[in-house]
Image (tube, grey):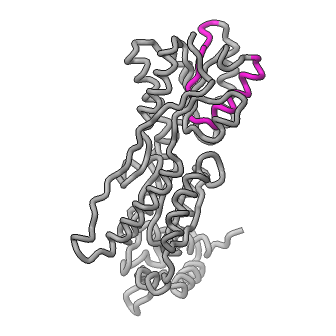
Amino acid sequence: MQTKYNKVKQAIRSQILDGTFVPHQKISSENELMKEFGVSRHTIRVAIGELVNEGWLYREQGAGTFCADRSLQDVKNHDQKNIAIMTTYISDYIFPEIIRGAESYLSSLGYQVSLFSTNNNLDNEKRVLENILTQGVDGLIIEPTKSAFSNPNINYYLNLERSNIPYIMVNAFYDELEPLCIMMDDEKGGFIQTEHLIEKGHRTILGFFQTDDMQGVKRMKGYIKAHRVHQIPINPKHMITYYSEEKKTKPIQELKNLLGNQEDKPTAIVGYNDELVLQLLDVLREQKIQVPRDMSIVGYDSSSLAQVSEVKLSSIHHPKHVMGETAAKMIVDLIREKHATSKKEKTELDSVIYEPELIIRQSTKAL
């Protein structure tokens, strides 16, 4: 169980890391902190004392307590080239290949790579960002957490910018920050998935989309756009949305419900990604529905899962390894630019958007 003074200490430390207190800014008085945290003066003094000893704060006689400038300390302690990679997942699905692409390039240049996973959880993202800001890094490659939502941790990213630590984002980005990013044209990908099925004669197409991430929102937009372009009405019940915490339960239950309805039976499915599609294939198998004879289905990412399933999945290609390597090259360029002394050494960097391509295999057929 965390002690009272530790809670106060961690809260003040978080305020330093998210930029609430900047170097040489006076922090709240003991009385204000006592009121804010509902603790005794002794508890506040113990917490402040430890933060002073650890170099987070400093005292000036008769003036108060101030936020220390840790940048000088970080430079002094930072003698190894280090880049952090923060993704929603590390060992699952397409992420190992993205990470390998980045790590192999960075290692060849002598960088140490630190890997962090948020598990697509914003509290985890906050803890990771605090860890990164504490240990000091040269740059960050970030896959945003719940990128479709407004992010409560934006101040940490603003503090990275104030600290002149470059970062880029992959797969998606936080709209508030407008960072350099490397991603797919997911709206076009969703459009191509759906249009492929429409061109094969399908008119009742289920769409499954994870909508707490920008990728899923954009893929759903492409699904809707394909129906609009081809003037095919959409039954709202045929668009199934879910959050990452629900990905192993809600889509499965929704598909079972829709298959149980004898009216307006679907003939095809557009999936948010191959991982989801494999779960849906299990449901179809249970219901004795064969792919592609009875149901056509299109995935996304053309992952290894698309080819190990009993039905080889038609799926949108994702440039996993290339994306990781490109991200690594871009962050190294940003670090070099940061240390450049002349205009000639500086290069203009742009975001990279990959064009989607449908890899056609065995999971779709014409009606």
Which residue: 68% across, 19% down? Answer: 257
Q: Is residue 316 magenta?
A: no
Q: Nearer the viewer, residue 321 or 279?
A: 321
Q: Which of 297 and 31 is in front in this view?
A: 297
The x, y position of residue 329, in whole percent, is: 42, 61
Q: Which residue is drawn at 21% across and 70% down?
A: 343
Front-lying residue, 111 or 246: 111
Q: Please determine whether, in this image, residue 221 is positioned above or below residue 331.
A: above
Which range is magenta? 263-288
Query: In the visual, does 250 lie left or right of 272?
Result: right
Q: Which residue is most to the left?
A: 343
Image quarter of residue 40: bottom right
Q: In this view, does 85 lie above or below 343?
A: above
In the rendered image, residue 267 lying in the magenta stretch gets the answer: yes
Q: Which residue is drawn at 46% across and 41% down?
A: 214
The one of 303 and 70 positioned closer to us in this rendering: 303
Can the viewer see residue 36? no
